[in-house]
Image (cartoon, coloured by chain):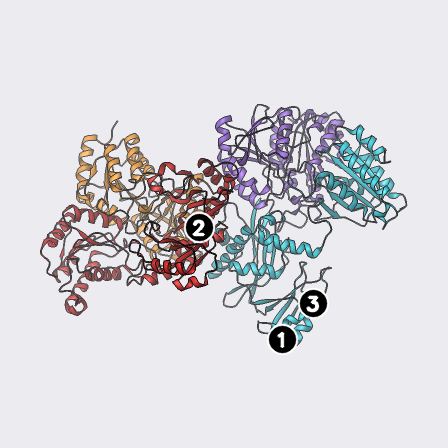
Chain colours: A red, B orange, C cyan, D purple
């Protein structure tokens, strides 16, 4: 979960990382009660990057200009995202700007300290400017000093920058982060440091063990107002403007199925991973219910003409899975009103593997759904059906 | 790696829900499950398996244990693994999904100094078909044979085992190192284990986007592996960043080049290492047969 | 530094360790604004033990009784200590009482978890009831479960007690404690747990790195209103009702000197350790200044008739030390008004070892102070002078 | 334990104040001080000693180092020691006083897994008279010889060395394990080192109230030490709990019996182990001479 800048800076303040005096602005009129002196920077609080270039950051000198600027920014969508709040912050003139980050690195299987003498940079585009230190063992401040020295710092900046890296690392561990980044870290002519912009990503798995973060996640989700909350069905992704839906158990299997369907010349619209069905972690719904709701979810997408169901090695046997699918088909046929938005629900191609396949075949035959044992054949069948002009 | 049917196995996070069912399945498959651990159920018996409150209590009764398999809440997995390490257990399989990666970082620091093998988290564990099941693999799909499978996913591993079984090729070992950003054991470790395993004659490596472990594996195969290896990478057609919950694809690659972690980068690495690549699961059996015929069961 | 019960309980509350609703009472009239319902327990907030038996704990049913009881307790000195505040706490009926503690153990060189099924006990008197678990490696909750099981707990109590031990350990590490103790931990008939009394000792060395604790220490010191704040001179201890003062550099050497003086038949009043003089940690005063002020400090104690100075192997040479001593003696003689409270300052016996002993001897001879090279002889001389009827 | 004059020595917490003076004293005594560490002074030279910002930078220039000596703020000592361990230094002497004991607990967990010897904290370190000075001992008091001194205090060690020197008995090694509740090395370790040291013919062990390390040492001497040992315990007449800042006397002894930690308990332990006890420092030389005469320089 990505935090907004003002949330990241609240955490920075708690950790003792220097940030500028600032105030959260929920509506333009809040600027009448501004407690920080002008000139002030108004910043759109969106999660996407490139906000400065998009016009989401404005300097203002007085209340009238500030309210006008705020009204503009509140209505400015940046890469499709409208801000819910702005941040009003004291203007700061930095002499130099550094880059600092702590990030989880899969290759080293450790947190990585990152730093650059040249802040404000797009780190992906200039990796050669970026210094790295792997935190091999339990963190100790010498790792931060290693980074400072690699960045080419000297004198008192070694200690002052190291001390900020230390605090970033503490935050990283305390809050279970994937990333904490200060970019830029402003350096005044007297060597004073200031976190001018901040980015924080909380690891999604860890949210539930931090009551404060769980609350933030809840608020964010309630704003998104989704019918299928995260984890309810499993995980789905919109893939392309295709007419095939893929429903599988396990991410790897879903990706393989997507590869095969695409290679065979069809385009997938949505792929849904129900979870591999041997998962013992408490999920909101049992496997059979997830399957049923997954079918409903994909059926509601009018562009989907065929759904390929590929389930291998779940605790549910093919017979049990076929039962769920057949019931879904029967229910759809008996209650056309449920799908009154469409002419018909999508065609189904079912590929299962396991012990009681014959039973599954019979149950599905009863509702005119074909069970295909061989994966390649199931894909062929799917692609053929997807090429038939849409009846829906 | 001790993978004989006699080796003793513990189940941590042992409860009335899934884990005792899986323990029963493991026992039925021939695995020597000697005890379950659950602080609240010490002294009880579930599915004919005695339950103890602490690992050290269990070991006092059943003797030293080779492997422990951790089920239960992902937030308690680190503690369970540290408890096992403190009790001198040196093979740990973590089944549960959802373990925070910083817990894994802590565990790995400990595991490395104690030379403990960690498989998982978010893994179905290990199966030696016909001999031992250490985890939640769909054992009915596997048949005993000479092909080793190492992968990062569970059901895709079953898919490959199924294709091999249907083509008359049995499996020597099936293992998933786990689908998370940070896993205990690596492809490299398993390539080495499978290379040394006497039963294994060919290896199928199954990868997916994210991280750089396939790239590292490709280099390692070229340098150090004598047995034939077939690679298969899922997710070639998946849009970048879409991962259906496999956090391995979220791996930080800052400063390592923009292309690292894509399926294309992995395929290029295997191509450079001259490792035959299957384009689809159904191609794997033929590539394995071809490699076995050519290599005669191992280069000299 | 020992915390008072109410301070310990504030920390418990912050950590999520269950404590009863309570209120701090600074003066009896505070009870008029009591926010917790009667019956209430009033507890004297003193650091010494045995407060219940001494009458420092009273149950009260209404405001009139409460104010009367509070007046009594405020005036009740327990082992010489008068409470500055009381704690008013909801009355609680425990079904059973446990004992829990985390303590630093010198033998294991690790923290130790301690627990007993039988709380409210005096642990020193019943060590056989006390279960121990050494926290060998980094703490993990299984250490707490080990303790619970050793205590003989079963069922849900294993987890609930372990979870309190976990939080105690977190507090122990977070605040650098020597000890955190809950005695008794109340257990209700339904298995609910409640920390009924708590003891916390902060490690003195670590106080300065915890701004919140440093503030508590400062307040405590300002109440004690000492002329020589901690660490100013070094460390001194009142030993017995004797007439000898001992001034040395290094705790071991001071103890040896005290042993020798006592064995030879004299009694020491105060022993002062100036620090070994090769100490590189920033002390408020340089070694020479500590020596001068140490001499003044011991001279102000009217019962001290002889001061034995024993300094070995300091960075200051004997010549430099002799200079400080001689200056002190001269100043005392020239300014009798400084010591107008007394007839005379104590006699000095000086024992030094090092390079320029001859120089030191001459400088001291000039002010009629004898330098004795041999420690046994210096002690003999001291004891002889201490037996001379007091001139002071 | 590498204690030869050639072995390379680093100084951490190296500054313009005391530590560079002590480093100069060490060099003058013959110690091979190769570098000082101070993040703010990297590139400078103090008292002819080159200063580096990081340990790893220094080692890149001066090569592998045998011992590091840590001065400076006690709150930074843990970090300094961990930095040294990460740079593969396996002998660490911590001079500074005031290190929080939980920092030492953390350090010891790390030191034990890496087999690192920690001397201190709150210790003057080690002296091999006439050869090498690793710390802040008042070297002018010592003379080369055959008596090893191991103690928990600094100036009391000098007192004993002085008494031995004045009686014509030189010293082989003088070491204080440190005056804190938790120290790195123990009496047992040093008894073993002195027992194995070829120059040492007799050992003087100097204890004080607090903890149980003298009691453990007494048992160990009876069981495992061949050379004659003389014990001296300071603080017999000190009221219980009065310790003049030596936190070793604050050691928790909960559950270990009420008497543990008193001078009396320690004296009883040495008596039981038949270790001669000196009642005062001035008795030590005669007891050493008697023991050397009787033992002829070591039991067989």
Q: Position of residue D229 (x, y in %)?
A: 68, 32
x, y percent for residue A310: 20, 53
Circle 2 chain: B
The residue wearing badge 1 is C61
The correct choice, above or below, for D90 with respect to C296 in the image is above
Mark 3 closeness class: few <14, some 14–19, many ≥20 residues within 10 Å = many
Q: Chain of mark 1?
A: C
What residue is shown at x 65% (from left), y 73% (from top)? C66
- Mark 2 to mark 3: distance in Å? 47 Å
Residue at 32% x, 51% y is A54
Which residue is found at the position 73% from the left and 38% from the top? Answer: C288
- In depth, the one of C258 and A342 nearer the eye is A342
Label 1: few (<14), some (14–19) or many (≥20) C-alpha neighbours in 10 Å: few
Kindly identify which chain the residue marked by label 3 belongs to.
C
Q: Which residue is mark 2?
A: B79
SS category of the residue bearing label 2: helix
Residue A355, image x, y percentages: 20, 53
Residue C389 vs residue C52: left or right? right
Instruction: Inspect this view and state whether residue B133 appears.
Output: no
Q: Which residue is mark 3?
A: C73
Is D187 displayed left or right of C352 in the figure? left
């Amino acid at each position: 979960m990505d935090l907004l800048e003002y949330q990241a800076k609240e955490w920075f303040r708690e950790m003792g990382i220097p940030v500028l005096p600032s105030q959260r602005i929920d509506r333009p009129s809040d600027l009448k009660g501004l407690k920080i002196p002008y000139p002030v920077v108004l910043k759109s609080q969106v999660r996407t990057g490139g906000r400065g270039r998009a016009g989401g950051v404005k300097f203002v000198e007085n209340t009238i200009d500030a309210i006008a600027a705020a009204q503009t920014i509140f209505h400015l969508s940046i890469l499709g995202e409208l801000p819910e709040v702005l941040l009003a912050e004291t203007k700061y003139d930095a002499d130099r700007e550094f880059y600092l980050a702590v990030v989880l690195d899969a290759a080293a299987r450790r947190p990585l300290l990152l730093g650059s003498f040249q802040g404000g940079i797009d780190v992906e585009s200039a990796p050669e400017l970026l210094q790295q230190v792997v935190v091999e063992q339990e963190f100790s401040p010498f790792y931060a000093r290693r980074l400072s020295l690699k960045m080419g710092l000297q004198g008192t900046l070694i200690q002052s920058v190291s001390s900020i890296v230390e605090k970033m690392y503490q935050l990283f561990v305390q809050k279970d982060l994937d990333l904490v980044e200060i970019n830029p870290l402003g350096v005044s002519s007297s060597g004073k440091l200031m976190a001018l912009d901040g980015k924080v990503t909380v690891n999604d798995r860890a949210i539930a063990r931090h009551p404060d973060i769980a609350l933030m996640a809840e608020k964010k989700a309630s704003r998104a107002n989704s019918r299928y909350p995260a984890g309810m069905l499993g995980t789905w992704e919109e893939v392309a403007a295709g007419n095939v839906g893929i429903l599988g158990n396990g991410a790897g299997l879903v990706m393989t199925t997507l590869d095969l369907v695409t290679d065979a010349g069809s385009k997938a619209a949505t792929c849904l991973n129900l979870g591999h069905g041997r998962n013992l972690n408490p999920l909101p719904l049992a496997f059979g219910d997830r399957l049923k709701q997954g079918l409903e979810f994909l059926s509601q997408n009018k562009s989907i003409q065929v759904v390929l169901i590929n389930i291998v090695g779940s605790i549910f046997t093919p017979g049990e899975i076929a039962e769920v699918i057949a019931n879904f088909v029967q229910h759809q046929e008996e209650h056309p009103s449920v799908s009154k938005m469409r002419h018909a629900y999508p065609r189904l191609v079912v590929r299962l593997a396991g012990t009681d396949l014959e039973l599954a075949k019979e149950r599905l035959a009863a509702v005119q759904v074909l069970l295909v044992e061989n994966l390649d054949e199931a894909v062929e069948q799917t692609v053929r059906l997807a090429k038939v002009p849409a009846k829906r | 790696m001790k993978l004989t049917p006699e080796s003793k196995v513990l189940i941590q996070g042992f409860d009335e829900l899934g884990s005792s069912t899986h323990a029963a399945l493991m026992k039925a498959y021939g695995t020597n499950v000697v005890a379950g651990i659950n602080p609240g159920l010490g002294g009880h018996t579930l599915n004919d398996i005695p339950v103890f409150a602490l690992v050290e209590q269990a070991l006092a009764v059943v003797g030293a244990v080779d492997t422990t398999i951790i089920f239960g809440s992902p937030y308690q997995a680190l503690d369970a693994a540290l408890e096992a390490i403190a009790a001198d257990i040196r093979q740990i399989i973590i089944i549960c999904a959802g373990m925070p990666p910083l817990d894994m970082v802590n565990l790995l620091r400990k595991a490395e100094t104690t030379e403990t093998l960690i498989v998982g988290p978010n893994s179905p564990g290990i199966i030696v078909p016909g001999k031992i099941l250490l985890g939640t693999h769909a054992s009915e799909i596997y048949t005993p044979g000479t092909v080793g499978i190492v992968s990062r996913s569970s059901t895709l591993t079953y898919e490959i085992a199924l294709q091999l079984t249907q083509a008359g090729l049995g499996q020597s070992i099936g293992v998933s190192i786990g689908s998370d950003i940070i896993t205990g054991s690596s492809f490299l470790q398993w390539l080495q284990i499978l290379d040394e395993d006497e039963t294994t004659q060919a290896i199928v490596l199954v990868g997916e986007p994210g991280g750089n472990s396939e790239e590292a594996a490709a280099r390692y195969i070229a340098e150090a592996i004598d047995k034939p290896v077939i690679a298969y990478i899922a997710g070639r057609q998946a849009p970048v960043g879409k991962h259906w919950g496999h956090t391995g694809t979220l791996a930080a690659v800052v400063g390592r080049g923009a292309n690292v972690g894509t399926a294309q980068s992995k395929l290029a690495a295997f191509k450079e290492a001259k490792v035959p690549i299957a384009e689809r699961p159904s191609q794997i059996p033929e590539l394995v047969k071809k490699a076995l015929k050519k290599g005669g069961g191992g280069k000299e």
